[in-house]
Image (spheres, helix red, strand yellow):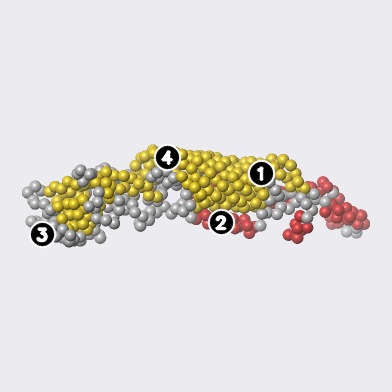
Amino acid sequence: MKHTLRSFFSFFLFLCFTWVQAQETTPKGESVKQTTVVKRVAVTPKTDQKIPDAPLPLVAIDPTLKKSDSIPLKTDRYGVRVGVDLYKVTRGLYDRNYKGIEFVGDYRLTKKYFLAAELGNENKTTDDDRVNFTTKGSYLKVGFDYNAYENWLDMENIISIGMRYGFSTFNQQLNSYRIYNANPYFAETPIIPSGKKFDGLSASWLEVVAGIKAKVFDNVFVGFSLRLNRLVTNKEPDNFSNLYIPGFNRTYDGSFGVGFNYTVTYFVPIYKKKVKPLAVPKQNDKK
Amino acid sequence: MKKIILLVVALALSFSGCEKDDICDANTPTTPRLVIGFYDFLNPSVLKNVSNLKVIGEGMTTGILFNGAETTSGTTISIPLKTVGTTTTYSFTLNSGNTNPALVDQDIIRFDYSTQELFVSRACGYKTIFTFDPTNPYTHTDATAANQKWIKFISVEKNNIENENETHIKIFF
């Protein structure tokens, strides 16, 4: 548990930095664009500072400046984003009881909506106080993300809320267990080895996902998401329980669970769409 | 925008706070004890108080504690059965600690049963339930052959020991 917590915090810390970076890059790209489109714009303020006595050339340029200001043809890029969950991959390095991988992907359907999916495989040995068991299985989650973040210019950051339907097939092996005896008069609480296998288990659930994705550099995004899960179906074994479900994570007494991922994704642009000019005044208002 | 980030981080931290609910609740029915009721041999429907009964498991040096004391003068007792193996032997000493050695009487009962392990929960793990051996659920002997047994009759009321809400064994004396 300590490991998990520690990684949790370190990831958030790391995430804070990446976010800052993301904020930095976008204005940079903006200024570059401006200079290429209208070079004079960038020059004029300089001359303004140096020689305030010669304002004549400025007047001549003014209309072009205005013109260029309204020009920025904002285009939205549409395409597929694919990547992996870094948390699962790195956890396998320091936690010998865990092996897992998750591929994530999304496809931009409209300006705001993304079709999203996660495909993963996990092999986790849980060592609890009373039971020790190994869960192996694969899962698939399919759903959508709604981007609630209004990007400036060519920024492509995402703050999204979405939903998924997850399905997992897996098996469990009970490695060892202990008998609970509230009256340990004979002081016998041995750890009983078992090795019993429970095959053909499955579960499905709904997830509410809150996520952030930030473009760190060209087409590469870093993001994380938090998930609240609720079991819909759960095929449980006889005389044991699905204490861990791949993709869903640890189960609790109720049917709720939580999830988390930290992803690095690559965006593959397929086509571009021009943004309707209606969006421009809106942005100005917001600003 | 910063507010959203803060909100998400706060949410994440609140999630990380809900861990370690792995304590088995005392009210959860787990491995049951054997419940024995003491009855009057001459009037079998009436519960009878034992006098300073001490119950010691085989191989143990101290007796089972009844409300903190090793002896009881009540009408029912609950004693644990061994979850490892299929037999548990107890010695029942009446008038334990009495200054008159003639009154101190020790009987030995061996219980034979089969066990079954049932999953309870993550926090509690498994519990054991017991089923008495159908042909020979108990063996009643005396510690010293010369002495007379104080237990006159033993009746198995319930063959399955699944909870502690019922009397499994009746002892008449």
Disc 3 target residue: B99
Q: Where, by quadrant of the figure, is residue A125 drawn?
A: top left
In this rendering, position of residue B111 left or right of residue A161:
left
Find the distance from the CA under tag 4 to the CA under tag 3: 60 Å
Disc 2 target residue: B11
> Residue B57: which numbered mark, if any?
none
Q: Residue at x 29, y 55 (%)?
A: B164
Quadrant of the image for the N terminus of chain B?
Answer: bottom right
User: What amino acid type is highlighted by mark number 4?
Assistant: Phe
At which x and y percent is residue B110? 19, 46
Q: Nearer the viewer, mark 3 or mark 1?
A: 1
Find the distance from the CA under tag 2 to the CA under tag 4: 35 Å
Q: Is residue B102 above or below residue A272?
A: below
Disc 1 target residue: A107
Q: Where, by quadrant of the figure, is residue A134 drawn?
A: top left
**Element marked by disc 4:** strand
**Element marked by disc 2:** helix
In this rendering, position of residue B87 left or right of residue B122:
left
Q: Is residue B20 above or below residue A136?
A: below
User: What amino acid type is highlighted by mark number 2?
Assistant: Leu
